[in-house]
Image (cartoon, rainbow, N blue to C red):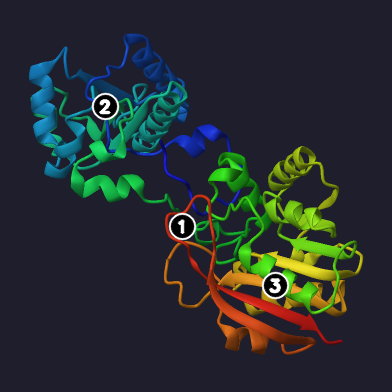
Amino acid sequence: MAQQRMNVQAPIDRLFAKRWSTRAFDPEKQVTEEQLAACLEAARWAPSCFGEEPWRFVVVDRVEHETEWQLLLSCLAPKNQLWAKHAPLLIVAAAEPLFSHNSESNRWAEYDTGQAMICMSLQAEELGLVSHQMGGFHAEALKSALGMPEQLHVMSVTALGHQADAESAPEEFQAMEQAPRTRRPLEESVHAACWGSTWSAPAASGWDARYQETPVEKLPWFHAGLDADIATALDGIESAGTAFKGKQALDLGCGPGTQAVALAKLGLSVVATEISHHALESAIDLAVSEEVNITFQVDDVLKSKINGSFDVVVDRGLFHCFSDEADQMAYLSTVRRLLNPGGTLLLKCFHKDEGCEMGPPGRYDETDIRRLFADGFELVESDKSHFDSDVMERSPKALFCHLKKTI
């Protein structure tokens, strides 16, 4: 199974989300002739300059072409040989460097061969196969071993087959098999209108993508019940003489809706906001199944259009998405506007002591909260805690804060 992608920035077809380059191939499962034909046919329909179709392929089957297989395997980089030897097929992709109509240099030949290979790889995913394109090989030795024409430019060797468990990969590759998939942010690769002018993806698109491609119960932040810190804080407030039953509560960044549902079951009148349409669909389904009435609204807390006044605002894991000061101030402006004087903000975020590289960019301690919320809020209590998760093996370190609006 492909690992989770941790920084998706827009919803895309699940075919792209599934594709990844595994090193764990099942040596017992063969690729059928029909599956291979479909993969090659997909490559055949790739675009190319002048319709030249400069790609050339050599398909080597581990069972059918044992001699050639061993020769090809020996041409791979030693580390590639460790795992590629389990794949049932190795496919050599090469580019014909000259145009057929005038014998002049085709400077797009290698680019177009790459386009053919991604078509092949995506077709393989559609068929339930997996692939891994390699650049680590000795090109001249490979051409000699397979009798390929000298003028061809060998571009890649692709292992094609069926997925095996990550634990079956050579030990030195198992960490890579299980690590989350990451990519450089779009903002670092895309320029708007001219070089150096930053292009930014809408924030909502990235959250929609995460919820689109991953079942909510498998997301790292999923927690089925009311967060223990929030529950304890609400119990304490009620014990002090403030009854919340029937009062207005706002769940900011409600995600899959588990906290909003739990709050509604306590008797609060709940409005739940979320930037992701896909997340809200899951949250609405949960509320219906649990037979609670919640008002759900798509909203961006940084540019909030929510109207109303609330006695309680709950934030389990939204504020720590913001490390930029302008975003922090926009968040505070929204909360300050919506929370009644004397109202309660229950805030849970990643603690500065949490050293995991993955996860939200904002990490805070009590000093940060006192400074950031100094205008209009009193910090009633703060505690070091952790994020309970139904998915993660280790609970991230958290800071839980009970704040009161003073103006």
Three-letter amino acid code of the residue under disc 2: Asp
Along the viewing direction, whichever of 121 and 327 lies nearer the viewer: 327
Locate the N terminus by quadrant: top left
Q: Mark 1 or mark 3, which has the lower sequence index?
A: 1
Q: How many marks?
A: 3
Q: Residues within 10 Å of mark 2 (few under 14, many from 20)?
A: some
Q: Label 3 belongs to which residue?
A: 233
Alpha carbon separation for disc pair 1 and 2: 30 Å
Residue 321: x and y, percent? 61, 66
Alpha carbon separation for disc pair 2 and 3: 51 Å
Residue 394: x and y, percent? 43, 60
Q: Residues within 10 Å of mark 1 (few under 14, many from 20)?
A: few
Q: Label 2 belongs to which residue?
A: 26
369 relative position to 73: left or right = right
Q: Residues within 10 Å of mark 3 (few under 14, many from 20)?
A: some
C-beta proximity under 8 Å, tags 1 and 3: no
Q: Which mark is residue 184?
A: 1
Residue 194: x and y, percent? 59, 61
Q: Assign a secondary structure to mark 3.
A: helix
Q: Nearer the viewer's eye, disc 2 or disc 3? A: 3
Q: Assign a secondary structure to mark 2.
A: loop
13 relative position to 175: left or right = right
Along the viewing direction, whichever of 68 and 48 lies nearer the viewer: 68
Q: Mark 2 or mark 3, which has the lower sequence index?
A: 2
The image quadrant of residue 228 is bottom right
Q: Which mark is residue 224?
A: none
